[in-house]
Protein backbone atom coordinates (compact mmCIF):
# COMPACT_ATOMS: atom_id res chain seq x y z
CA UNK A 1 0.00 0.00 0.00
CA UNK A 2 1.28 3.42 -0.87
CA UNK A 3 2.10 5.95 1.78
CA UNK A 4 -0.41 8.49 3.02
CA UNK A 5 0.58 11.93 1.89
CA UNK A 6 -2.04 13.91 3.80
CA UNK A 7 -4.92 13.56 6.24
CA UNK A 8 -7.28 12.57 3.41
CA UNK A 9 -5.71 9.15 2.94
CA UNK A 10 -4.25 7.52 -0.13
CA UNK A 11 -5.30 8.47 -3.65
CA UNK A 12 -7.09 5.68 -5.53
CA UNK A 13 -8.08 5.47 -9.18
CA UNK A 14 -11.50 3.97 -9.82
CA UNK A 15 -12.53 1.84 -12.77
CA UNK A 16 -16.14 0.86 -13.31
CA UNK A 17 -17.52 -1.93 -15.46
CA UNK A 18 -20.91 -1.12 -16.91
CA UNK A 19 -21.96 -4.69 -17.71
CA UNK A 20 -20.35 -8.09 -17.39
CA UNK A 21 -17.94 -8.68 -20.28
CA UNK A 22 -17.28 -5.02 -20.96
CA UNK A 23 -13.97 -3.36 -20.14
CA UNK A 24 -13.45 -1.52 -16.87
CA UNK A 25 -13.39 2.19 -17.65
CA UNK A 26 -11.61 4.79 -15.60
CA UNK A 27 -14.14 7.18 -14.11
CA UNK A 28 -12.23 9.21 -11.55
CA UNK A 29 -10.26 9.15 -8.34
CA UNK A 30 -10.91 9.38 -4.61
CA UNK A 31 -9.27 9.26 -1.20
CA UNK A 32 -9.45 6.31 1.19
CA UNK A 33 -7.40 4.79 4.00
CA UNK A 34 -7.81 1.12 3.08
CA UNK A 35 -9.13 -1.24 0.41
CA UNK A 36 -12.61 -1.68 1.85
CA UNK A 37 -13.00 2.08 2.26
CA UNK A 38 -11.82 2.64 -1.31
CA UNK A 39 -14.52 0.27 -2.61
CA UNK A 40 -17.23 1.79 -0.46
CA UNK A 41 -16.29 5.34 -1.39
CA UNK A 42 -16.21 4.34 -5.06
CA UNK A 43 -19.70 2.94 -4.71
CA UNK A 44 -20.93 6.18 -3.14
CA UNK A 45 -19.23 8.43 -5.67
CA UNK A 46 -19.55 6.57 -8.94
CA UNK A 47 -22.14 3.77 -8.95
CA UNK A 48 -25.05 4.98 -6.85
CA UNK A 49 -27.30 5.50 -9.83
CA UNK A 50 -26.82 2.22 -11.64
CA UNK A 51 -23.70 3.25 -13.55
CA UNK A 52 -22.01 -0.09 -13.16
CA UNK A 53 -21.95 -3.66 -11.96
CA UNK A 54 -18.33 -4.00 -10.82
CA UNK A 55 -15.60 -1.74 -9.47
CA UNK A 56 -11.81 -1.83 -9.48
CA UNK A 57 -9.99 0.42 -7.05
CA UNK A 58 -6.27 0.82 -7.71
CA UNK A 59 -3.82 2.82 -5.57
CA UNK A 60 -2.79 5.71 -7.82
CA UNK A 61 0.84 5.05 -6.89
CA UNK A 62 0.61 1.57 -8.45
CA UNK A 63 -0.09 3.03 -11.87
CA UNK A 64 2.88 3.47 -14.17
CA UNK A 65 2.12 6.33 -16.52
CA UNK A 66 3.84 7.70 -19.60
CA UNK A 67 4.95 11.30 -19.38
CA UNK A 68 4.30 14.11 -21.88
CA UNK A 69 7.94 13.85 -23.04
CA UNK A 70 7.23 10.29 -24.20
CA UNK A 71 4.70 11.57 -26.72
CA UNK A 72 7.09 11.54 -29.67
CA UNK A 73 8.97 8.26 -29.23
CA UNK A 74 5.96 6.37 -27.93
CA UNK A 75 3.13 7.43 -30.17
CA UNK A 76 4.18 9.44 -33.23
CA UNK A 77 6.34 6.79 -34.82
CA UNK A 78 3.48 4.70 -36.14
CA UNK A 79 1.52 7.47 -37.81
CA UNK A 80 3.44 7.49 -41.12
CA UNK A 81 3.23 3.75 -41.70
CA UNK A 82 -0.30 3.16 -42.88
CA UNK A 83 0.28 -0.56 -43.29
CA UNK A 84 0.43 -0.81 -39.49
CA UNK A 85 -3.16 0.29 -39.16
CA UNK A 86 -5.98 -2.18 -39.68
CA UNK A 87 -7.93 0.35 -41.77
CA UNK A 88 -8.12 -1.90 -44.82
CA UNK A 89 -10.49 -4.33 -43.20
CA UNK A 90 -14.23 -4.08 -43.17
CA UNK A 91 -15.66 -4.53 -39.69
CA UNK A 92 -18.71 -6.75 -39.92
CA UNK A 93 -21.93 -5.15 -38.81
CA UNK A 94 -23.13 -6.13 -35.40
CA UNK A 95 -19.70 -6.16 -33.75
CA UNK A 96 -19.96 -4.16 -30.58
CA UNK A 97 -17.52 -2.36 -28.33
CA UNK A 98 -14.84 -1.59 -30.91
CA UNK B 1 -57.72 -4.76 10.70
CA UNK B 2 -56.69 -2.59 13.61
CA UNK B 3 -55.80 0.67 11.88
CA UNK B 4 -54.63 2.43 15.00
CA UNK B 5 -52.09 -0.29 15.77
CA UNK B 6 -50.87 -0.29 12.17
CA UNK B 7 -50.64 3.51 12.17
CA UNK B 8 -48.61 3.49 15.40
CA UNK B 9 -46.28 0.85 14.02
CA UNK B 10 -45.72 2.82 10.81
CA UNK B 11 -44.96 5.93 12.85
CA UNK B 12 -42.38 3.96 14.80
CA UNK B 13 -40.58 2.88 11.62
CA UNK B 14 -40.99 6.23 9.91
CA UNK B 15 -39.70 8.13 12.95
CA UNK B 16 -36.75 5.76 13.40
CA UNK B 17 -35.56 6.59 9.89
CA UNK B 18 -36.50 10.26 9.97
CA UNK B 19 -34.82 11.17 13.25
CA UNK B 20 -31.65 9.19 12.61
CA UNK B 21 -31.42 10.74 9.14
CA UNK B 22 -31.84 14.20 10.64
CA UNK B 23 -28.96 13.50 13.04
CA UNK B 24 -26.75 12.11 10.25
CA UNK B 25 -27.45 15.07 8.01
CA UNK B 26 -25.99 17.33 10.71
CA UNK B 27 -22.66 15.93 9.52
CA UNK B 28 -23.17 17.39 6.04
CA UNK B 29 -20.08 19.44 5.27
CA UNK B 30 -18.46 18.43 8.56
CA UNK B 31 -17.39 14.85 7.81
CA UNK B 32 -13.83 13.78 8.58
CA UNK B 33 -12.98 13.97 4.88
CA UNK B 34 -14.85 14.57 1.66
CA UNK B 35 -15.57 10.97 0.66
CA UNK B 36 -16.77 10.00 4.12
CA UNK B 37 -18.90 13.13 4.30
CA UNK B 38 -20.60 11.94 1.12
CA UNK B 39 -20.97 8.37 2.38
CA UNK B 40 -22.69 9.41 5.58
CA UNK B 41 -25.01 11.91 3.96
CA UNK B 42 -25.88 9.34 1.29
CA UNK B 43 -26.94 7.05 4.10
CA UNK B 44 -29.00 9.88 5.57
CA UNK B 45 -30.71 10.28 2.19
CA UNK B 46 -31.54 6.56 2.08
CA UNK B 47 -33.12 6.82 5.53
CA UNK B 48 -35.10 9.92 4.59
CA UNK B 49 -36.38 8.02 1.55
CA UNK B 50 -37.58 5.08 3.63
CA UNK B 51 -39.09 7.44 6.18
CA UNK B 52 -41.00 9.24 3.47
CA UNK B 53 -42.49 6.03 2.04
CA UNK B 54 -43.47 4.79 5.47
CA UNK B 55 -45.00 8.06 6.68
CA UNK B 56 -46.85 8.46 3.41
CA UNK B 57 -48.43 5.07 3.99
CA UNK B 58 -49.10 5.94 7.64
CA UNK B 59 -50.97 9.09 6.57
CA UNK B 60 -53.04 7.01 4.18
CA UNK B 61 -53.89 4.43 6.84
CA UNK B 62 -54.82 7.17 9.31
CA UNK B 63 -57.45 8.56 6.92
CA UNK B 64 -57.48 12.01 8.48
CA UNK B 65 -56.26 13.86 5.43
CA UNK B 66 -52.75 14.37 6.76
CA UNK B 67 -49.68 14.00 4.51
CA UNK B 68 -46.22 12.59 5.24
CA UNK B 69 -45.00 16.18 5.62
CA UNK B 70 -47.66 16.92 8.23
CA UNK B 71 -46.53 13.87 10.17
CA UNK B 72 -42.86 14.85 9.95
CA UNK B 73 -43.08 18.56 10.54
CA UNK B 74 -46.22 19.21 12.52
CA UNK B 75 -46.12 16.66 15.30
CA UNK B 76 -44.87 17.60 18.74
CA UNK B 77 -42.20 15.90 20.82
CA UNK B 78 -44.50 13.52 22.68
CA UNK B 79 -46.06 12.32 19.42
CA UNK B 80 -42.76 10.97 18.08
CA UNK B 81 -42.05 7.32 18.77
CA UNK B 82 -38.53 6.82 17.39
CA UNK B 83 -36.19 4.73 19.55
CA UNK B 84 -34.21 7.05 21.83
CA UNK B 85 -30.92 5.94 20.29
CA UNK B 86 -31.81 7.69 17.01
CA UNK B 87 -32.01 11.11 18.64
CA UNK B 88 -28.78 10.97 20.65
CA UNK B 89 -26.49 13.84 19.60
CA UNK B 90 -23.74 12.91 17.14
CA UNK B 91 -20.80 13.26 19.53
CA UNK B 92 -17.49 12.38 17.88
CA UNK B 93 -17.26 10.22 14.79
CA UNK B 94 -16.79 7.04 16.83
CA UNK B 95 -20.06 7.78 18.63
CA UNK B 96 -21.91 8.43 15.38
CA UNK B 97 -20.58 5.17 13.95
CA UNK B 98 -21.39 3.12 17.07
CA UNK B 99 -24.95 4.48 17.09
CA UNK B 100 -25.27 3.81 13.38
CA UNK B 101 -23.93 0.26 13.60
CA UNK B 102 -26.38 -0.66 16.36
CA UNK B 103 -29.34 0.67 14.36
CA UNK B 104 -28.07 -0.76 11.05
CA UNK B 105 -27.75 -4.25 12.52
CA UNK B 106 -31.26 -3.96 13.95
CA UNK B 107 -32.76 -2.71 10.69
CA UNK B 108 -30.99 -5.39 8.68
CA UNK B 109 -32.58 -8.20 10.70
CA UNK B 110 -35.87 -6.38 11.12
CA UNK B 111 -36.45 -5.67 7.43
CA UNK B 112 -35.33 -9.22 6.57
CA UNK B 113 -38.37 -10.44 8.53
CA UNK B 114 -40.67 -7.54 7.73
CA UNK B 115 -40.30 -8.29 4.02
CA UNK B 116 -42.51 -11.33 4.66
CA UNK B 117 -45.31 -9.09 5.97
CA UNK B 118 -48.83 -9.84 4.84
CA UNK B 119 -49.20 -6.12 4.18
CA UNK B 120 -47.94 -5.68 0.61
CA UNK B 121 -46.92 -2.06 0.99
CA UNK B 122 -44.84 -2.83 4.07
CA UNK B 123 -43.26 -5.83 2.34
CA UNK B 124 -42.41 -3.68 -0.67
CA UNK B 125 -40.84 -0.88 1.36
CA UNK B 126 -38.85 -3.46 3.33
CA UNK B 127 -37.54 -5.15 0.18
CA UNK B 128 -36.09 -1.84 -0.98
CA UNK B 129 -34.77 -0.95 2.47
CA UNK B 130 -32.93 -4.27 2.89
CA UNK B 131 -30.61 -3.51 -0.02
CA UNK B 132 -29.75 -0.11 1.36
CA UNK B 133 -29.39 -1.34 4.91
CA UNK B 134 -26.95 -4.07 3.90
CA UNK B 135 -24.69 -1.37 2.61
CA UNK B 136 -25.22 0.85 5.66
CA UNK B 137 -24.25 -2.00 7.95
CA UNK B 138 -21.19 -2.84 5.89
CA UNK B 139 -20.15 0.81 6.10
CA UNK B 140 -20.65 1.21 9.84
CA UNK B 141 -19.23 -2.22 10.74
CA UNK B 142 -16.05 -1.56 8.78
CA UNK B 143 -15.62 1.77 10.59
CA UNK B 144 -16.12 0.01 13.92
CA UNK B 145 -13.21 -2.26 13.02
CA UNK B 146 -11.05 0.67 11.98
CA UNK B 147 -11.68 2.55 15.21
CA UNK B 148 -11.39 -0.50 17.43
CA UNK B 149 -8.16 -1.72 15.85
CA UNK B 150 -6.75 1.69 14.96
CA UNK B 151 -4.87 3.79 17.48
CA UNK B 152 -5.13 3.76 21.25
CA UNK B 153 -7.20 6.93 21.06
CA UNK B 154 -9.63 5.63 18.41
CA UNK B 155 -10.11 2.43 20.39
CA UNK B 156 -10.83 4.37 23.56
CA UNK B 157 -13.27 6.67 21.83
CA UNK B 158 -15.20 3.74 20.39
CA UNK B 159 -15.30 1.93 23.73
CA UNK B 160 -16.46 5.11 25.49
CA UNK B 161 -19.16 5.59 22.88
CA UNK B 162 -20.40 2.01 23.36
CA UNK B 163 -20.33 2.37 27.15
CA UNK B 164 -22.62 5.39 26.90
CA UNK B 165 -24.88 4.19 24.13
CA UNK B 166 -25.56 0.65 25.34
CA UNK B 167 -28.22 1.89 27.76
CA UNK B 168 -30.34 2.78 24.72
CA UNK B 169 -30.20 -0.60 22.97
CA UNK B 170 -33.09 -2.30 24.79
CA UNK B 171 -35.46 0.49 23.77
CA UNK B 172 -34.90 -0.32 20.10
CA UNK B 173 -36.76 -3.62 20.57
CA UNK B 174 -39.65 -2.22 22.59
CA UNK B 175 -43.14 -3.39 21.64
CA UNK B 176 -46.63 -2.65 22.91
CA UNK B 177 -50.06 -4.29 22.87
CA UNK B 178 -50.76 -2.90 19.40
CA UNK B 179 -47.59 -4.47 18.05
CA UNK B 180 -48.58 -7.83 19.49
CA UNK B 181 -51.93 -7.55 17.71
CA UNK B 182 -50.10 -6.99 14.43
CA UNK B 183 -47.97 -10.09 15.04
CA UNK B 184 -51.14 -12.18 15.16
CA UNK B 185 -52.28 -10.89 11.79
CA UNK B 186 -48.88 -11.61 10.21
CA UNK B 187 -48.08 -7.97 9.51
CA UNK B 188 -45.03 -7.71 11.74
CA UNK B 189 -42.49 -10.27 13.02
CA UNK B 190 -41.80 -11.42 16.57
CA UNK B 191 -39.24 -9.08 18.10
CA UNK B 192 -37.47 -11.72 20.22
CA UNK B 193 -35.97 -13.52 17.22
CA UNK B 194 -34.81 -10.23 15.74
CA UNK B 195 -33.16 -9.29 19.00
CA UNK B 196 -31.17 -12.51 19.20
CA UNK B 197 -30.07 -12.15 15.55
CA UNK B 198 -29.06 -8.58 16.34
CA UNK B 199 -27.08 -9.71 19.39
CA UNK B 200 -25.23 -12.26 17.29
CA UNK B 201 -24.32 -9.65 14.66
CA UNK B 202 -23.23 -7.13 17.29
CA UNK B 203 -21.11 -9.71 19.10
CA UNK B 204 -19.33 -10.45 15.84
CA UNK B 205 -18.69 -6.79 15.08
CA UNK B 206 -17.53 -6.04 18.63
CA UNK B 207 -15.15 -9.01 18.58
CA UNK B 208 -13.70 -7.98 15.23
CA UNK B 209 -13.31 -4.45 16.54
CA UNK B 210 -11.55 -5.64 19.73
CA UNK B 211 -13.97 -3.76 21.97
CA UNK B 212 -16.07 -5.20 24.77
CA UNK B 213 -19.81 -5.26 25.20
CA UNK B 214 -20.92 -3.19 28.21
CA UNK B 215 -22.43 -5.45 30.88
CA UNK B 216 -25.10 -4.88 33.54
CA UNK B 217 -26.24 -1.62 32.02
CA UNK B 218 -29.34 0.17 33.28
CA UNK B 219 -31.59 0.33 30.23
CA UNK B 220 -33.32 3.57 29.20
CA UNK B 221 -36.86 3.16 27.91
CA UNK B 222 -39.93 5.14 27.04
CA UNK B 223 -39.80 5.91 23.33
CA UNK B 224 -43.03 4.07 22.54
CA UNK B 225 -44.82 6.40 24.96
CA UNK B 226 -43.20 9.43 23.39
CA UNK B 227 -40.82 9.98 26.29
CA UNK B 228 -37.59 11.40 24.88
CA UNK B 229 -34.16 12.63 25.86
CA UNK B 230 -33.61 16.29 26.61
CA UNK B 231 -31.83 16.92 23.31
CA UNK B 232 -34.76 15.77 21.21
CA UNK B 233 -36.58 19.09 21.49
CA UNK B 234 -33.62 20.89 19.94
CA UNK B 235 -33.53 18.44 17.04
CA UNK B 236 -37.23 18.92 16.33
CA UNK B 237 -36.94 22.69 16.61
CA UNK B 238 -34.33 22.71 13.87
CA UNK B 239 -36.00 20.08 11.69
CA UNK B 240 -39.44 21.68 11.87
CA UNK B 241 -38.35 25.31 11.77
CA UNK B 242 -39.53 26.11 8.24
CA UNK B 243 -43.02 24.66 8.63
CA UNK B 244 -43.43 26.29 12.04
CA UNK B 245 -42.20 29.72 10.91
CA UNK B 246 -43.97 29.65 7.54
CA UNK B 247 -46.95 27.30 7.91
CA UNK B 248 -47.82 25.59 4.64
CA UNK B 249 -44.68 26.87 2.90
CA UNK B 250 -43.92 25.03 -0.34
CA UNK B 251 -41.21 25.17 -2.98
Image (tube, rainbow, N blue to C red):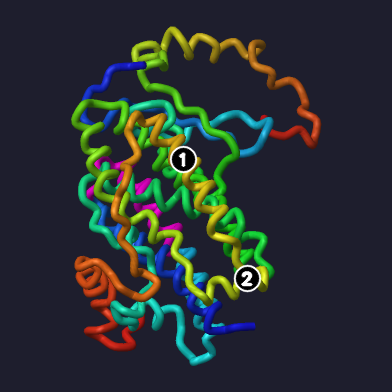
- The answer for which chain carries disc 1 is B
Q: How busy is the neighbourhood of tag 2: few (under 14 within 10 Å), some, or many (20 plus)?
A: some
Residue A8 shown in magenta: no
Q: How busy is the neighbourhood of tag 1: few (under 14 within 10 Å), some, or many (20 plus)?
A: some
Q: Quadrant of the N terminus of chain B?
A: bottom right
List x then y, in percent, for residue B224. Answer: 40, 72
The residue at 47%/45% (across/down) is B199
- Near-viewer residue (B123 or A26): B123
Q: For residue B121, which numbered disc appears in the image?
A: 2
Please, what secondary structure does the residue beneath circle 1 have?
helix
- Near-viewer residue (A80 or B85): B85
The disc, 2 or 1, on the residue closer to the chain's N-terminal end is 2
The residue at 35%/39% (across/down) is B213
Q: Is residue A81 left or right of residue B216?
A: right
Taking A28 as reference, is B243 above or below it?
A: below
List x then y, in percent, for residue B165. Answer: 29, 50
List x then y, in percent, for residue A85. Answer: 65, 16
Residue B42 shown in magenta: yes
Q: CA distance from mark 2 to mark 1?
A: 26 Å
| Residues shaded magenta | B30-48
Disc 1 designates what residue? B138
List x then y, in percent, for residue B53. Answer: 52, 70
> Please, what is the dominant secondary structure of the magenta stretch?
helix
Amino acid sequence: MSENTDSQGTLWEIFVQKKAGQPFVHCGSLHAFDKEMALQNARDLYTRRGEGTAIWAVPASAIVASSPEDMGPFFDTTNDKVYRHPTFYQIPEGIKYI
Amino acid sequence: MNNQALFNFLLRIGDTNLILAQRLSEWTGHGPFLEEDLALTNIALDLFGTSRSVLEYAAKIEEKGRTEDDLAFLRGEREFVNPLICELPNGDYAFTIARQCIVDAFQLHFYSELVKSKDETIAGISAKAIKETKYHFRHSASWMERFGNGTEESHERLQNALNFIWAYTEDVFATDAGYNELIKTGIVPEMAAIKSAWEKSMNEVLAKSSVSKPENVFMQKGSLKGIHTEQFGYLLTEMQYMQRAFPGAKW
